[in-house]
Amino acid sequence: MTKIAVFASGRGSNFQVVYQRTKDGYLPAEIALLICDNPQAGASAFAAAHDIPCAVIRPKDFPTPEMFGEELLEALSAQQIEFIVLAGYLKKIPGNVVQRYANRIVNIHPALLPAFGGKGMYGMRVHEAVFRSGAKISGLTVHLVNDEYDTGPIVLQKAVAIDDCNSPEEIARKVLEYEHQALPEAIKLLLETSYAVEGNRVILGKR
Ligand code: GRF
């Protein structure tokens, strides 16, 4: 069983799905910690109701990203966390955490990177930009986390046809359904398969 931590800032539907997939045996993992930057997050209410330890750690309470990172690392090592899942987490992961968990942090982004990503491109902003662009296909990307927003090595992508969507909200709803399948799938892949990172590519089956 791999001990994983989920980081979430909001509603937490991806967190809930990952939790369910650990419970039904699909994922060989246990969620041993939820980290939130927002005590109001729906994710933290779910954690409380399911006896998942939850730490609220807010970057604004620390003078530097490094000190924020030290606090995160302490919480992670107290639970012997081996793998991290960012599920709707809006804050930047400090460099010391990225280094300690190199290639063991995944993020889900609700569009096909490298388009529609980067700083400030999160949540509905992504779907609004996709809608405005007139694209007929959107999708999702699960990627490893590096020091920059949304640029880490891609683990898995799914394309979602959105030519039947008439608003950013419709795109968001449709993409979210696919996210709920793809995030557990990507985590399973990384926990059960050896992989290496070459340049910005994830090479499955290689150590
Ligand atoms: C998801 O669309 C995810 O891709 C993005 O933020 C949203 C979070 O939704 N990073 P939820 O909190 O998991 O319901």
Image (cartoon, rainbow, N blue to C red):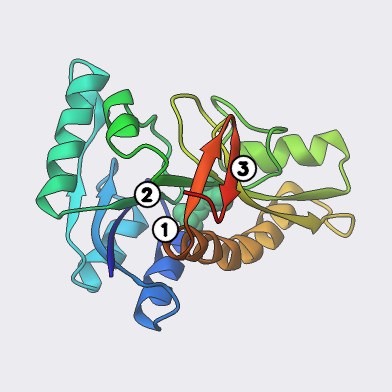
Q: Is residue 153 above or below residue 46?
A: above
Label 1 within 8 A of ligand 1 by Cβ:
yes
At label 2, the amino acid type is Ala
At label 3, the amino acid type is Met
Residue 172 location (% of width, % of height) = 67, 53
Q: Residue furthest bottom?
A: 24
Quarter of the image with the N terminus is bottom left
Q: Is residue 24 visible?
A: yes
Residue 171 image-quadrant placement: bottom right
Please give the residue where the numbered disc 3 appears in the rendered image: 124
Please give the residue where the numbered disc 1 appears in the rendered image: 12
Q: Nearer the viewer, residue 135 or 144?
A: 144
Residue at x 29%, y 40% (from the top left corner):
37
Q: Secondary structure at mark 1?
A: loop
Disc 3 crowd, CA 10 A, few/some/many (<14, 14-19, 20+)? some
> Contact (CB < 8 A) between labels 1 and 2?
yes
Q: Nearer the viewer, residue 176 or 149?
A: 149
Separation (CA) of disc 3 from disc 2: 16 Å
Q: Is residue 174 left or right of residue 45?
A: right
Separation (CA) of disc 3 from disc 1: 15 Å
Q: Secondary structure at mark 2?
A: strand
Please give the residue where the numbered disc 2 appears in the rendered image: 8
Residue at x 50%, y 44% (from the top left corner):
196
Q: Is residue 198 left or right of residue 20?
A: right
Residue 126 location (% of width, % of height) = 65, 38
Residue 6 location (% of width, % of height) = 34, 54
